[in-house]
């Protein structure tokens, strides 16, 4: 249940940030997602952008966690 609440909080937070960027664009990934276009394809909707942001969050967490764990193993094996 807590996981579902956290996901909803994440979605609400970033949906509000996306709305802000639609009104006031900046030089950041949120504005880039809003402006992303392919010929003949509809622009991304908010749900799609939220999914992309969630994937970026997970990927960033995963790679950082693995990097730290690997670095610690190397330091322990080779002080």
Image (cartoon, rainbow, N blue to C red):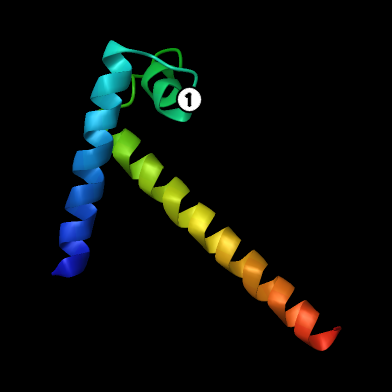
Residue 13: where, in percent of width, then height?
24, 40
Instruction: In the rendered view, tell whether residue 45 sits above or below residue 24.
Output: below
**Quadrant of image for the N terminus:** bottom left
Q: Residue at x 19, y 41 (%)?
A: 12
Instruction: In the rendered view, tell whether residue 79 sits above or below residue 15.
Output: below
Instruction: In the rendered view, tell whether residue 9 sits above or below residue 40.
Output: below
Dot 1 corresponds to which residue?
28
Check the image and name the residue furthest to the front: 79
Residue 75: where, in percent of width, then height?
78, 79
Q: Residue at x 43, y 17 (%)?
A: 26
Q: Residue at x 40, y 28 (%)?
A: 30
**Quadrant of image for the C terminus:** bottom right
Determine the image quadrant of residue 58: bottom left
Determine the image quadrant of residue 47: top left
Per the image, label 1 sits on a secondary structure element best described as loop
Instruction: In the rendered view, tell whether residue 63 sits above or below residue 26.
Output: below
Q: Residue at x 59, y 60 (%)?
A: 63
Report the side of 54 relative to 60 (left or right): left
Check the image and name the residue furthest to the bottom: 77
């Amino acid at each position: 249940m807590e996981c579902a609440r956290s996901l909803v909080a994440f979605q609400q937070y970033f949906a509000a940030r996306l709305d802000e960027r639609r009104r006031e664009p900046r030089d950041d990934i949120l504005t880039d997602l809003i402006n992303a276009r392919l010929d003949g394809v509809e622009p991304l909707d908010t749900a799609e952008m939220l999914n992309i942001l969630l994937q970026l969050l997970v990927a960033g967490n995963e790679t950082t966690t693995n990097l730290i764990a690997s670095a610690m193993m190397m330091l322990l094996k080779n002080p």
